[in-house]
Amino acid sequence: MTRAAVLGAGSWGTAFAQVLVDAGTSTTLWARRPELAAAITTLHRNIDYLPDVDLPEQLVATADPAEALDGADIVVVAVPSQTARANLVELARLIEPDAVLVSLMKGVELGTTKRMSEVIAEVVDFPSERVAVVTGPNLAREIAARQPAAGVVACTDLAVAERVQIACNSGYFRPYTNHDVLGCEIGGAVKNVIAIAVGIAAGLGFGDNAQASIITRGLAETSRLGEALGADPMTFAGLAGVGDLVATCMSPLSRNRTFGENLGRGLTFEEVVAITRQTAEGVKSCRSILDLADKHDVAVPIIEHVAYVVNDGMTVDEMLRSLLSRDPKHERDHDV
């Protein structure tokens, strides 16, 4: 029987561990704090991130990474994207040499501008065809409540993707396979930044027209960047593209949208950080995604302006004026 280890007991790591168990995969969840691991194992509750969700009795958690990884055929990495390298350096020696690695992370590494699958392959020293990505419109709280959802398992080796697909096909979570790892990861990373912009618009009191416009233009930026890097354009019309983008931009469960809403309502960046309990990946990755776009000479004005607000002190009013004052172009121009 397939055995999985999920590294990271945040809301998405915990929800995906539940998905694996419900699909019949023996799963151990690694939590850094012993008290959280004990609560998951004995109370069947993640008291910090999903306190009102009854987790499967079969789901075991541990604070010992060696115990979690012992004999694991599938190793799922579900830590914040900007801490992935440090975590994996610590854990790489414990991973079984024939395991498949799976990234739940949606970000681009600061400094290197590497995608999460690239970071995993580099640190663990695994070939890229043994590193898969799970992405799509996957709001953790809805999946933890066993509401129907679809996702994508992407790997350059489709046989590996199918192996992971079987391990997480739980009935309420319906995974599809894809070979375009690059496109799936770009879609997953960029949508977090666009969701901040949509949240800012909502916080400013703007309605559905404004928000839909940002989503659509954000999809254009995502597609331009992905295609410049060599992604399949069709990926962005699927679950890993528009599906994930819409869910993250429109749901009140989205941390990135909520972060943007609070900025739009007038809170300072520091105030929003102080009240944000879990990581909003778009805040961490907007600069690295902008660096990646600059490296490939791709125009991404929405991403650029979010980075200005997050990193450079631009106000949301200045962001709005700057974006709306841009010269009008043809909708398909590559510099709008």
Image: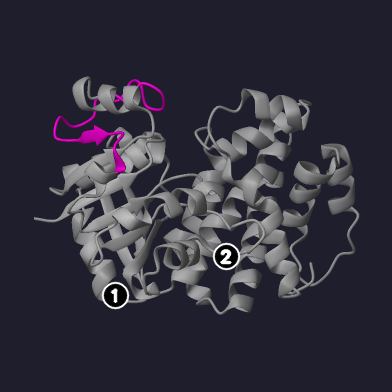
Disc on the earlier residue, 1 or 2: 2
User: In the rendered image, which quarter is residue 128 located in?
Assistant: bottom left
Q: Determine contact: label 1, label 2, CB under 8 Å.
A: no
* Position of residue 84 measured from the top left corner of the image (x, y, whole percent): 49, 51
Crowd rating for badge 2 (residues with CA inside 10 Å; few <14, some 14–19, many 20+): some
**Which residue is the site of mark 1?**
158
Residue 143 appears in the picture as rendered:
no
Q: Which residue is identified by label 2?
A: 114
Residue 91's place in the image compared with 125, above or below, is above
Decide if residue 156 is on the left or right side of residue 206: left
Tell me the SS state at disc 2: loop
Using the rendered image of the protein, determine whether residue 211 is visible from the camera's viewpoint.
yes
Q: Quadrant of residue 8?
A: top left
Instruction: State which region is magenta.
Output: 45-65
Q: Is residue 10 above or below residue 267?
A: below
- Mark 1 or 2: the one toward you: 2
Q: In the rendered structure, which amino acid carries the disc numbered 2?
A: Lys
Q: How far from the left and from the top, in percent, is residue 298?
A: 73, 72
